[in-house]
Image (cartoon, rainbow, N blue to C red):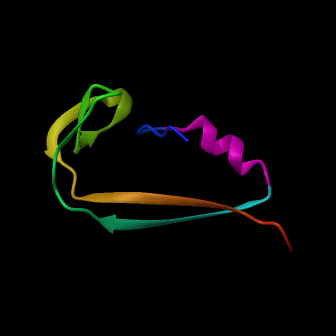
Amino acid sequence: MDIWPGICSNLFTALKIKSALSFDEAAIKMCLDYHKNKQVIEGFEDLRFLGRNLAVDSQVLVFMLRRKFTN
C-alpha cells in the first residue's frame, strides 16, 4: 500500500474485510532522507493539508492490519 500522512482510503477499504487493527507508538532515529519517487525529503514533520515544517520527527504511530481467517 502506498501510504501518505493523513487519511488513507486504502486502509478504510481494507477494514471492511474481517480483520484486526492494532497500533503502537515507537521512537525512531532522527534522520533525513531524500525519496526520489515522491521528490521529497522525508523525516520532517508532515501534517498533510496543514503543510510540513522543519521539526524532525522522533516518534511514529505504527498501524498493523491483520486479516482474520478463523473465529
Q: In the shown orientation, is residue 55 left or right of residue 2?
A: left
Q: In the shown orientation, is residue 55 left or right of residue 10?
A: left
Q: Nearer the viewer, residue 47 or 43?
A: 43
- Residue 61 lies, in percent from the top left, at 40, 58
Residue at image location 35% in from the left, 27% down from the top: 37
Is residue 14 depicted above or below 64 in this figure?
above
User: What's the magenta region?
Assistant: 7-17
Residue at image location 16% in from the left, 56% down from the top: 30
Image quadrant where one finds the N terminus: top right
Asked whether residue 42 is drawn in magenta, I would say no
Q: Residue furthest right?
A: 71
Q: Nearer the viewer, residue 69 or 47?
A: 69
Q: Nearer the viewer, residue 2 or 20?
A: 2
- Residue 2 lies, in percent from the top left, at 50, 37
- Residue 67 lies, in percent from the top left, at 73, 61
Q: In the shown orientation, is residue 21 left or right of residue 68?
A: left
Instruction: Report which quarter residue 12 is drawn in.
Output: top right
Residue at image location 80% in from the left, 58% down from the top: 18
Number of marks: 0
Q: Residue furthest front?
A: 36
Instruction: Report which quarter residue 49 is drawn in.
Output: top left
Q: Residue furthest bottom?
A: 71
Image quadrant where one finds the C terminus: bottom right
Q: Does the magenta stretch mainly form a helix, a strand or a loop? A: helix
- Residue 24 lies, in percent from the top left, at 45, 67
